[in-house]
Image: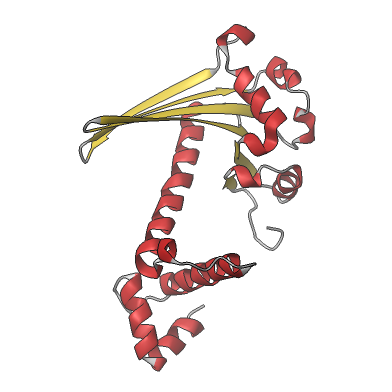
Amino acid sequence: MKLLDIHQTIVTIDGIGCQTDIVDTIVAQGADYVIAVKANQATLFADVQAAFEPSLREFAPAYYKTVSKGHGRLEIRECWACQAQDVLDFMGEYKAWTGLHCVVKIASERRLAGRVEQDVRYFISSLTADPNRLLEVVRAHWQIENQVHWVLDIAFRQDENRVRKDHAPHNLAILQHLVLNLFKQDKSLKVGVNANRLRAGWDNAYLLNVLCSS
């Protein structure tokens, strides 16, 4: 991350990135963060959950809700955000998280034919407690995540890959992301990623063009 220019951006990371040294790096480079909190940070996770328990608070967190319909489903998203100092003081180790300004709770419900899916997620952020903005930031993160995963699965058959030994899965994932980014930068061929891969395998001139376009 120290090699990236993230100044005045918002960095979003899943629970694996909920580490104090990562937060320190983000803030030191002039960026904000919205980071998921999960069980890998057990104390922080419990504190953030408790902050939104009605029986344990005397404040009304900022709230925002969206409802969208389309493609045979109804999606409801709710966001609560709080930056009350009393809440942060309640969190025993909040000062260890550089720049922490608010805690966030997002509940989503997806209604499909014959079933209902529900999910609740928690976050810490250096942003102010604006639930509308925070909901947009988190949603944008998962849109990118889902789109990239879909492309890697369809074009690179990532989910079918059986590479499991040592560092091979991680190294292969890095190479696949690198190739995907190279194809996105190349504008000479207006086709899908799978067709790009085939063309690069058949045409050395096109392969060289892709490699040099970066």
- Give the residue at x 60% y 23%: 49
Among the 4 quarters of the image, the one containing residue 109: top left
- Give the residue at x 33% y 73%: 194
Vertical position of residue 182 compared to residue 13: above or below: below
The percent position of residue 3, horizontal first and vertical second, equals 69, 63
Residue 188 visible in image: no
The type of colouring in the image is secondary structure
Among the 4 quarters of the image, the one containing residue 159: bottom left
Left or right: where does residue 80 sit relative to residue 200?
Answer: right
Residue 40 visible in image: yes
Vertical position of residue 52 compared to residue 98: above or below: above
Q: Looking at the image, which is closer to me, 59 or 13?
A: 13
Quadrant showing the N terminus = bottom right
* Total residue callouts: 0
Left or right: where does residue 70 sit relative to residue 169?
Answer: left
Left or right: where does residue 159 sit relative to residue 35?
Answer: left
- Give the residue at x 53% y 66%: 173
Left or right: where does residue 208 sit relative to residue 171?
Answer: left
The percent position of residue 25, horizontal first and vertical second, equals 74, 50
